[in-house]
Image: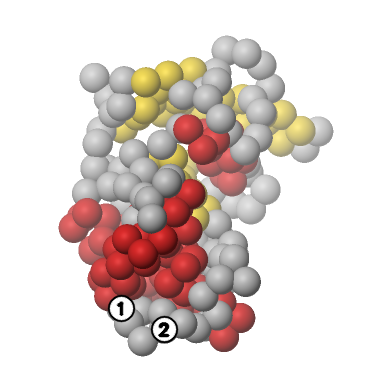
Amino acid sequence: MSYFSVKNLHKQWPSANVKFNYECNKGEMTCILGPSGSGKSTILNIIAGLEKNDDNSLEIVLDDLRIENLAPQKRGVGMVFQSGALFNHLNVCDNVAYGLISNGIKKSQAREEACEYIKNFNLQGLENRMPQTLSGGEKQRVALARTLITQPKLVLLDEPLSALDAELRHRLANQIREWQKKIGFTAIMVTHDESEAQYIADKIVRIC
C-alpha cells in the first residue's frame, strides 16, 4: 500500500483544467513539472487544504489516514512557499521554532531544538537576524528548517528555488536532495525547470 495517495483532485478555470491522481511511497521525492499557469501550485494547495476541490469526490490518504476533510493544521502536511513566507517580526531562531511552540512545546525547548536545525541548515550565526536582512537563499533555508523541524508526514515545496539565481538554485537543490535523503521525509516539489526535476526527484509527474 502506498504511503500517500490522492484521487479525483480536480480544479477548472475558464482557461485551464487540472485533474490529478497520484500515489507514492514513504521517503520519495516527487517533482510536478509543468509550465506556468498549468495548475501545479493549485495541486499543492488542495492537498494542503488551502484551496477547495471542485467536487466532493476528492480522496487524500496519508500514512493510512484520510485527510481531505481535516483542517490544514491537522493534516500532517508542511509547506514551503516560493517566497519563503517568513514572519518578519520574528528573528531566524524564533521563525524556526514557531511550529514547535504552536504545537505546545515550551519556548526554551523549542529554541534549543531550533538552534540544532539552524546548524544543520548551515545558518549558524544568523539566529538573531531578522528576515528582512537575509538573502534569498538564506530565507529559503530558514523556511525549510521551519517546516521540517515539526517532522511533517508530507512536505510540499512550491517552486522554492524559482526566485534564486542559477548558481544558488543549483546549490540549494543539492542541499534539499541531501536533506531529503538524510532525514527521509516524503516530499512533492513543484517546478518548471526540467533539469532541476531530473536531478532532485525520484519520480517526475508532468502536467500540461
Specify the quadrant of the image occupied by residue 132.
bottom right
Question: Disc 2 residue type?
Answer: Leu
Disc 1 versus disc 2: distance between alpha carbons?
Answer: 9 Å
Image quadrant in which the C terminus is located = top right
- Tell me the element at label 1: loop
Question: Is residue 31 depicted above or below 171 in this figure?
Answer: above
Q: Name the residue under label 2.
A: 126
Image quadrant in which the N terminus is located = top left
Q: How is the image coloured?
A: secondary structure
Question: Is residue 208 depicted above or below 88 in this figure?
Answer: above
Residue lying at 26% horizontally and 61% vertically, measured from the top left: 179
Is 131 on the left-hand or right-hand side of 29? right
Q: Position of residue 176 (x, y in %)?
A: 32, 63
Residue lying at 27% horizontally and 75% vertically, measured from the top left: 119
Comparing marks 1 and 2, which lies closer to the viewer?
2
Residue lying at 47% horizontally and 58% vertically, measured from the top left: 98
How many neighbours does mark 2 have within 10 angstroms: few (below 14), some (14-19), or many (20 or more)?
some
In the drawing, what numbered circle is on residue 69?
none
